[in-house]
Amino acid sequence: MKRVDVRRRHLAVTAVAVLAAGGLALPLTTPASAVGATADDFNGDGYKDLVVATPKAKVNGQTQAGQLTVLYGSASGVSTSRSALISQNTAGVPGTAEAYDKFGTSYVTGDLDGDGYTDLAVGVPSEKASAAPDFGIVQILWGGSRGLVNGALTVYAASDSSSRYLYGSNLAVGDFDGDGHDQLAVTGHSGISVFDDGFTRTTAPTQTDLSTGPSGATRGTGSIVAGDFDGNGADDLAVSGDNDYEDDEHGETGVWLGYYAGGSDGMTFTDNPASVPLTAAHARAAGDFDKDGYDDLVTYGQGASGAGTIAVHYGGTGGIPGSTRSRLIDQDTAGVPGVNESGDGFGGPVSVGDVNGDGYADAAVGASAEAVGTLEYAGAVWLLKGSASGLTGTGAQSFTQNTTGVPGTAEFADQMGSGLLLQDLNGDGRADLTAAARGEDVFDDDAHYSDGADWILRGSASGLTTSGAMSFSEKAFGLTYRNKSFGSVLGG
């Protein structure tokens, strides 16, 4: 391993900061500790809130300008009646909704200003702003007692940053220096930047570019996952993407994975750790599946036929590079419903949370190309459960739109499971699953469009349950745009 915590350090440019009338719910002079905020709780009521993003949404006639839908949690979960639509035309959000900005291509939550309320960072990688060195911005919407109505801050990549093209493509939040405060990590098309502590509602702290490998090699940064894999109290990063297929000098092809160990003195980079086979190296999610105090990393590989598989790499004192235990899980694994089939894409999306409240992290896994009977690409989701021996197929569950109690009916190209998010929306200590079906046709006419919709299955002591299951689409919010894959983005 080699120390590469600083390749270049940049002062982040603060282009626009807008504060909504009424000011802040908590004074910045006496901020609450970042660890005091409930994750995903924008209004501080103790319940997690749900964000579903539609980067292709038409806003005021602007094609693919992008829009967020925020559903606020409660003791009864979320409801479309307790919601807000947010775009770049929303009061307090800098800028203007423009065609092909794709506001909401990515998002992540965390208490970035340390006031005790969760904030929402939104990636807008297709934005072309005069102050941006290339395409892409990130906009941070500040949480407060009334939710996300406290203005926003726009940040850009530095002019010489490797992440400046399509800046904001993927986002992650973690405490990378171990001081108890959330930090923001941002990827572009082929670079990673990490902000220091110290966001305020009008200024951004310094951001640092991280190495992505040999000088001169172009490596895509397609996914980013944060977790404390070595148990030192500082979060680490796993970043993966495609190598430059035309890089004759370095001879690199296929997928690469970079591991960045966090700590008080910077981040230590390991290039393609040997513990993670590059045949299944797309970083997907993190959680402690065996409850040993170390986060574990989930990666994904298509396999020879595209059936898909996930690999679980167990954390320990050496982090992921020092991992000596891993496991592959697919539809042919004992206990997992179904069978491997060409092109299913099992593991394309993965989300982690404790669904049954036993203290072990569980994993929701999607296969949006899964056939349901003769209906190709109808899609399905699975729940794999954690245990003292880690993540296994024992007690695994699977769901489609044809499962009894799940609203709707499976149809060709619905692509249920194209996006997943596990979070406890009703405060009962068990994570609930939100699953996107980006290809769902919701207007019931003769033409099939990818209108998009989302489903929520509640967590219970036995796992996911269809009792109280709900679904919603753009129609629930008075929206009528077609073929925009409503709610298809459920995170970073």
Image (spheres, helix red, strand yellow):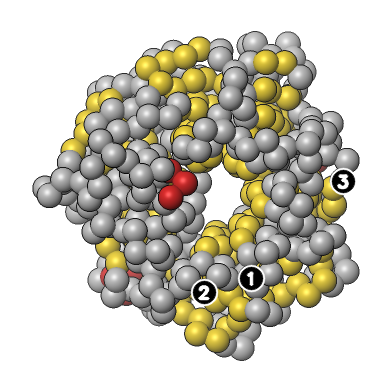
Residue type at mark 3 is: Arg
**Residue, disc 2:** 428
141 sits left or right of 399 in the view: left
Identify the amino acid type marked 1: Gly
Q: Is residue 100 above or below residue 196?
A: below
Foreground: disc 2 or disc 3: 2
Near mark 1 (Cα within 10 A), the count class, few <14, some 14-19 or many ≥20, is some
Q: Nearer the viewer, residue 223 or 126?
A: 223
Q: Is residue 68 visible?
A: yes
Name the residue at 43% across, 62% down: 48
Labels 2 and 1 touching (C-beta < 8 A): yes
Amino acid beneath label 2: Asp
Q: Position of residue 462 (x, y in %)?
A: 68, 80
Secondary structure category for the residue under label 2: loop
Provide the residue designation for mark 1. Answer: 357
Dot 2 crowding, Cα within 10 Å, few <14, some 14–19, many 20+: some
